Image (cartoon, rainbow, N blue to C red):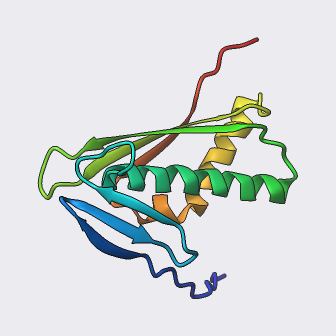
Amino acid sequence: MSIKLKPKFFGPVTMESAGEGVFSYKTETGLTGKTGAPATNEVAAPYDLIMAALASCVGVSLEMIARQKKIDLGDISIEVNAAKALDLPSRFGSFDVSVSMSAIEDKEQATQLLKQAKEMCTVSNTLNADVTLSLKETASA
């Protein structure tokens, strides 16, 4: 059985120099922001954006799966950490994504949901790095 995928295109995201290593970006929907180096409270570093993209993609994927299965995830919290590769070319070598879902108490169910989210997430599937998802341990009430 073969799977047929429909073509889907993204963008444009436009980028313009704002000077001194800072760039203004605008998405197709009109969202604007600044990226560059050094990062400040008004300028996101490119590595922050890629980690945010990974986290949001995992979150959206989890919510899509939960809707399909009629599962309440509760509040979702996602933290992403990255490590730079120790060889060239300069790149991330790995990402660790820690996820908590307040309404899911069954660790096996949560782990299965994470596995499905990773398989569905376009960003994690695109990155040429190891992407590890794990459940964030929360304090019991």
- Residue sticking out furthest to the right: 70
Residue at the far top in the pictured view: 141
101 left or right of 26? right
Q: Residue at x 57, y 84 (%)?
A: 8
Residue at the extreme front of the image, as rendered: 19
In the figure, is residue 47 to the left or right of 74? left
- Point 40% across, 55% down: residue: 50
Residues 38 and 129: in front is 38
Which quadrant does the C terminus fall into? top right
Total numbered badges shown on the rendered structure: 0
Regarding residue 116, the answer to whether it shows in the image is no
- Which percent across, then down, holds residue 64? 73, 59
Closer to us: 106 or 41: 41
Check the image and report above or below for 130 versus 3.
Answer: above
When the figure is inspected, residue 43 is found, relative to residue 13, above or below; the finding is: above
What is the x, y in percent for residue 106? 76, 30
Rendered image quadrant of residue 72: top right
Where, quadrant-wise, is the N terminus in this rendering? bottom right
Give me the residue at 57% from left, 59% from top: 119
State which quadrant residue 99 falls in: top right
Look at 77% across and 28% down and name the residue there: 105
